[in-house]
Amino acid sequence: MKNELLLHLDKLHTTKLGMERIKTNLHLDTWDVVDWCKQAICAPHCSITRKGKNWYAEVGDCRITVNAHSYTIITAHKMKV
């Protein structure tokens, strides 16, 4: 099941509002948020789970939420330790 998200990385996208939300939440200094998320999801230490309609990719101290049907990156947050 984890491989399903990895197999469809080419479908990952986000909205303009989503891009701004992710950049703000993770304090990113990059214009290509989707590429940053793809790299994070591909990282060997990334944990991917699916709950209902969303995929959750946890890597380092962040969690990326992706809609499982449209492959839209909804949001990303720093996790509390």
Image (spheres, grey):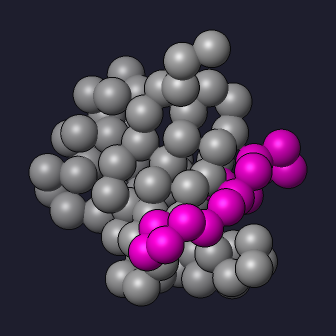
**Residue 12 visible in image:** no
Where is residue 27 drawn, in percent x and y?
Answer: 37, 22
Q: Residue at x 23, y 39 (%)?
A: 21
Instruction: Using the image, determine if residue 64 lies above or below residue 2.
Output: above
Horizontal side of 13 relative to 65 (left or right) equals left
Instruction: Using the image, determine if residue 21 lies above or below residue 13.
Output: above
Where is residue 12 drawn, in percent x and y?
Answer: 45, 72
Residue at the limit of the structure toward the right, as seen here? 44
Q: Quadrant location of residue 81?
A: top right
Image quarter where the N terminus lies is: bottom right
Where is residue 50 drawn, in percent x and y?
Answer: 60, 67
Q: Residue at x 75, y 72 (%)?
A: 2
Where is residue 15 drawn, in percent x and y?
Answer: 20, 62
Horizontal side of 40 relative to 14 (left or right) equals right
Horizontal side of 52 relative to 67 (left or right) equals right
Residue at the limit of the structure toward the top, as seen here? 81
Residue 81 in magenta?
no
**Residue 61 visible in image:** yes
Instruction: Using the image, determine if residue 24 lies above or below residue 3.
Output: above
Q: Quadrant location of residue 51?
A: bottom right
Image: magenta residue range: 41-54
Count of numbered labels shown in the rendering? 0
Q: Residue at x 83, y 44 (%)?
A: 45
Instruction: Using the image, determine if residue 12 lies above or below residue 65.
Output: below
Please name whichever residue, 22 or 65, is drawn nearer the observer in this view of the structure.
65
Q: Residue at x 41, y 42 (%)?
A: 76
Residue 49 in magenta?
yes
Residue at the limit of the structure toward the left, as seen here? 17
